Image (cartoon, helix red, strand yellow):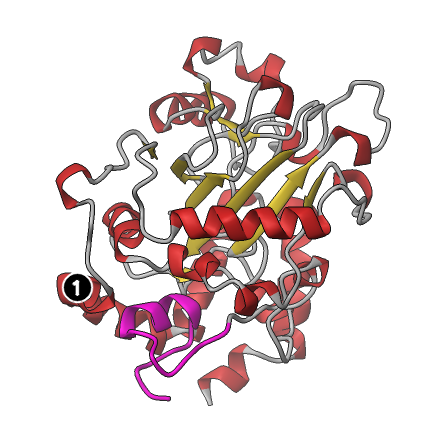
Amino acid sequence: MANSILDNSLTRWLGRAVEHDHYRRLGIRNTMQLSRAFNRLKNRKQHLYRRELYHQLDKLLDDNGPRQTTSHKPRMEDGWALDTSKSLPHLEQMLEDSEQIISERGGVNRGGGGRSFFQQILSNEHLSRYPSILNFATSSDVLDVVIDHLKFIPALSVHKPLGVRLNESDKRFGPDTNGQLSESQLFHCDYQCTPMVYVIVTLREVTLKSGPFCFLPLSASNQAIESLQYGKRGRPYRVTDEEMYKIVNRDKLFEFTYPAGSVLFLDSSRCFHYGSRDSVVPRYLMMYAYVSVCRTDFGDLIRPEYNEPVCDERARLWRSSYPTYSEDSHLRRLLIDWRYMGDD
């Protein structure tokens, strides 16, 4: 009964209206608060179930698989952590499989309008064909770091930002903007869920010529948020370099220029970031997004669910899903299926 009241044509229309143009009508902060409250009602059962299981986290992690790097586990301090050990489970296989995908689908302009410089090249079949992609994302070593920061059991996002992306950045495919930066090339914080963790893996070496993913740590980002009144009604979602560097020293910027197999953990909802600027050398990243079942957007409401896993551009309009298997651990299933309540 509750879901029929909360999920209907009127609430879907209202959700679209307040989400329009990066939450401009009510402001980002107000819309995030409203949508979080709405989703806590709509997804109350899933929220309470995960909150209870959080107290059994060690057992869930152990049942999910051995933690191999407990002695030098990275911790997200100041909103981020970096692992360059190349020892995380399934990483080596995921790199090999990603090379196959890049060889198969890379280097082709797939459209995308003003954001075609940054495109998803996974197809729907890849998650089943290459299990390493989800095996890495749901491994206990990775989840230990993610959940330690979030303080709740997350799920892989099923829509923007999609929970699993193999992104190609290539200057050739973007529109001619006369050198003007646009979209995700400008500083921003993600508003779809907070906190939210990105796990970003370099699939090939990233240099300054690749248009690296760049971010400001949490302390510097907080300084900018306060000074800019970022998120308040009437304030823009994107921030220019000129505006940012009036507040924050440029030397605070972290450029993710590392060899293949480097792994960045980042709270993208609290740390300003940008990327894909002037990617003369194509950049390839695997990007995972871990979110709450009570997000700070209306995407679960306004995007219909597709009847099969969706990883391509259709994920902008539909809710995706991820393949599940009978041998999945309890924790892995929670990550892959946000509605999972322990019953098949």
Q: Quadrant of residue 53?
A: bottom left
Task: From the top left corner, tell me how far across and down residue 31 is, in percent.
Answer: 53, 51
Q: Nearer the viewer, residue 254 or 268?
A: 254
Task: From the top left corner, tell me how far across and down residue 185 is, in percent.
Answer: 65, 29
Query: Residue 191: in sight, yes or no?
Result: no
Q: Is residue 62 left or right of residue 172?
A: left
User: Across the whole image, how many numbered discs are drawn on residues?
Assistant: 1
Q: Amino acid at mark 1?
A: Asp
Q: Is residue 327 magenta?
A: yes
User: Which secondary structure is most common in the magenta stretch?
Assistant: loop
Pointer 1: residues within 10 angstroms few (<14), some, or many (20+)?
A: few
Q: Quadrant of residue 305?
A: bottom right
Task: From the top left corner, tell me how far across and down residue 22 is, in percent.
Answer: 64, 45
SS for callout 1: helix
Q: Nearer the viewer, residue 244 or 78?
A: 78
Task: Report which residue position mark 1 lands on.
Answer: 62
Q: Is residue 187 above or below residue 10?
A: above
Q: Is residue 107 left or right of residue 90?
A: right
Q: Quadrant of residue 7?
A: bottom right
Task: From the top left corner, tell me how far across and down residue 126 is, in percent.
Answer: 59, 63
Which residue is drawn at the image coordinates 43% and 73% (left, top)?
A: 337
Query: Residue 59: in sight, yes or no?
Result: yes
Which residue is drawn at the image coordinates 28% and 36% (left, top)?
A: 76
Q: Is residue 284 magenta?
A: no
Q: Quadrant of the C terminus?
A: bottom left
Q: Nearer the viewer, residue 337 or 49?
A: 337
Q: Which residues are magenta?
A: 323-344
Q: Is residue 102 left or right of residue 132?
A: right
Q: Nearer the viewer, residue 109 or 288?
A: 109
Which residue is drawn at the image coordinates 45% and 84% (left, top)?
A: 2
